[in-house]
């Protein structure tokens, strides 16, 4: 059994949060650059130019990329042969989240659902983090992290279709969700699509799909084809950067597909804004 | 599409020359407010009570900034999604406000209020919080400090870059732009 110190996890989580707050990941930066070069609308081209300039300023001056520094979302794979010494893994991740958000002057955006009271002085600064755990073989802890903003989360949707809806039904649904969203989720977006499983499995899969690097190819050939097809359809909508009209509404579509019940075809669409702040570490 | 440099407070003369798609560099004072602050401001208007700032010619920026780093007036400060202010904005415009800065589409009532009261809805680039925050030279909380990032701030901006989305003639850049680039099979 390998032992990992509680405080080492706190520090590792704190560090990735600080880094993601100000440094746009290379995959996102490159995808935006390519989008700017290929965008046909001069207005949208200028918007993407501002987005890239913003990323340069944020990195050079260590300023948050966006004022919406998100809720902290984690996918954590815990090796069966790991023991955390000195506390619970969940507490370490939350403590690291609080430290990272405080140290980097990021915004505390968690609140009570109805009173809307900010939780920074009660539960903790931008706490609780949203953590999805999985148990795997091995003696390591694998942490995927993303800062998830509210604007793009607000346009996300899920629906359980009858099986007969098939691929065509799913493609139409994704297109409808993105069309209705317009400029609200801060395009150029990344679209996460979760297919199959149960209702909640589809939702979690659509979220996890957003953690994949933009530009990476789906290992499942059929899904890779479907991603291409949906991306093409979305970019025909004409929404453009920040909804100003253009040819680059989405940078990528990522699909995660799961086996499902014989009676249902669940689908979830989770949208990520252009500031796709995500990273991955192994401890 | 024209380019303008304007200083607040704005007048009807200023707003009537703007057309959807024009770009504007704003200078002067802006007031920040999101939904929680709007709810309180509109309640004051309805009760006929005094507001924490003069609405006449004012431009409201929909933003909840990050905390400032030591020595800075404000942190990152890009626009938030505007539809959450749709139910409040017509009252603000009716009572003298001339402009709003946010991101994302507005409902018909807001667009109509822009026509009726010479108001402009400006779009700023969402997610460009570091870039936009740098154009803010001073910031002061003037109301509702308990709302944290959602408090009302009086901010001074220099060449703050915005685009006209909804003008005083009923035009909508989101609809115009999308129509131009939509590909129909």
Image (spheres, rainbow, N blue to C red):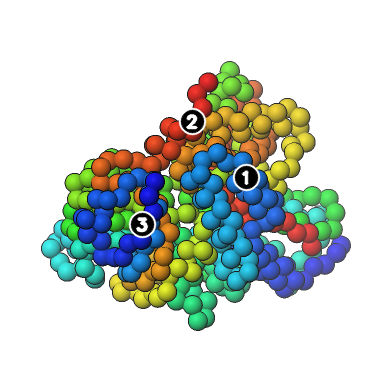
The mark total stands at 3
Tell us which disc is closer to us: 1 or 2.
1
Most foreground residue, A156 or A178 = A178
Tell us which disc is closer to us: 3 or 1.
3
The residue where tag 3 is placed is B4
Q: Mark 3: which secondary structure? A: strand
Residue drawn at x 68%, y 45% is A214
Neighbours of disc 3 within 10 Å: few (<14), some (14-19), many (20+): few
Res A136 seen here: yes
| Position above or below: B105 against B30 | above
Most foreground residue, A253 or A13 = A253
Separation of disc 3 and disc 1 at Cα? 26 Å
Residue drawn at x 64%, y 62% is A23
Quadrant of the rendering where the N terminus of chain A is positioned: bottom right
The residue where tag 2 is placed is B182
Residue drawn at x 76%, y 50% is A135
Quadrant of the rendering where the C terminus of chain A is positioned: bottom right
Of all residues, the one furthest to the front in this rendering is B2
Q: Are marks 3 and 1 on the same chain?
A: no
The residue where tag 1 is placed is A37
Separation of disc 3 and disc 2 at Cα? 28 Å
Q: Are marks 3 and 2 on the same chain?
A: yes
Residue drawn at x 65%, y 53% is A29
């Amino acid at each position: 059994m390998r032992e990992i110190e509680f405080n080492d996890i706190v520090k590792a989580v704190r560090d990735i949060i600080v880094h993601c707050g100000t440094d746009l990941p290379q995959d996102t930066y490159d995808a935006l650059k390519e989008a700017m070069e290929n965008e046909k609308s001069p207005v949208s081209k200028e918007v993407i130019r501002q987005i890239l300039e913003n990323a340069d300023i944020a990195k050079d001056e260590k300023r948050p990329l966006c004022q919406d520094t998100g809720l902290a979302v984690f996918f954590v794979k815990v090796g069966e042969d790991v023991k955390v010494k000195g506390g619970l893994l969940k507490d370490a991740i939350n403590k690291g989240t609080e430290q990272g958000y405080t140290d980097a002057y990021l915004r505390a955006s968690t609140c009570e659902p109805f009173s809307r009271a900010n939780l920074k002085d009660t539960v903790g600064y931008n706490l609780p983090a949203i953590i999805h755990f999985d148990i795997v073989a091995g003696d390591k802890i694998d942490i995927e992290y993303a800062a998830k903003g509210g604007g793009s989360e607000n346009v996300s949707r899920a629906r359980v279709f009858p099986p007969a809806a098939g691929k065509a039904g799913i493609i139409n649904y994704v297109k409808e969700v993105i069309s209705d969203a317009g400029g609200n989720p801060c395009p150029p977006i990344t679209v996460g699509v979760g297919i199959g499983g149960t209702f909640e499995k589809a939702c979690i899969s659509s979220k996890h799909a957003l953690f994949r690097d933009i530009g990476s190819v789906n290992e499942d050939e059929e899904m890779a084809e479907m991603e291409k097809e949906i991306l093409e359809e979305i970019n025909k909508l004409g929404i453009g950067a920040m909804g100003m009209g253009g040819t680059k509404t989405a940078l990528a579509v990522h699909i995660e597909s799961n086996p499902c019940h014989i009676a249902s075809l669940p689908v979830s669409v989770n949208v990520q804004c252009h500031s796709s702040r995500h990273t991955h570490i192994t401890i | 599409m024209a380019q303008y440099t304007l200083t607040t407070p704005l007048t009807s003369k200023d707003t009537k020359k703007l057309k959807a798609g024009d770009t504007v560099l704003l200078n002067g004072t802006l007031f920040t407010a999101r939904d929680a602050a709007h709810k309180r401001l509109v309640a004051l208007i309805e009760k006929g009570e005094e507001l924490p700032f003069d609405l006449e010619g004012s431009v409201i920026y929909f933003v909840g900034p990050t905390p400032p780093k030591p020595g800075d007036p404000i942190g990152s400060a890009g626009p938030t999604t505007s539809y959450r202010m749709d139910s409040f904005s017509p009252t603000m415009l009716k009572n003298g406000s001339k402009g709003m800065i946010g991101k994302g589409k507005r409902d018909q009532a807001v667009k109509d209020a822009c026509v009726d009261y010479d108001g402009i809805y400006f779009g700023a680039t969402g997610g460009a919080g570091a870039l936009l925050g740098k154009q803010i030279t001073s910031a002061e909380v003037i109301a509702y400090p308990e709302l944290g990032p959602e408090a009302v701030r009086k901010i001074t901006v220099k060449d703050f870059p915005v685009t006209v989305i909804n003008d005083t003639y009923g035009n909508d850049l989101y609809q115009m732009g999308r129509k131009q680039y939509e590909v129909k099979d």
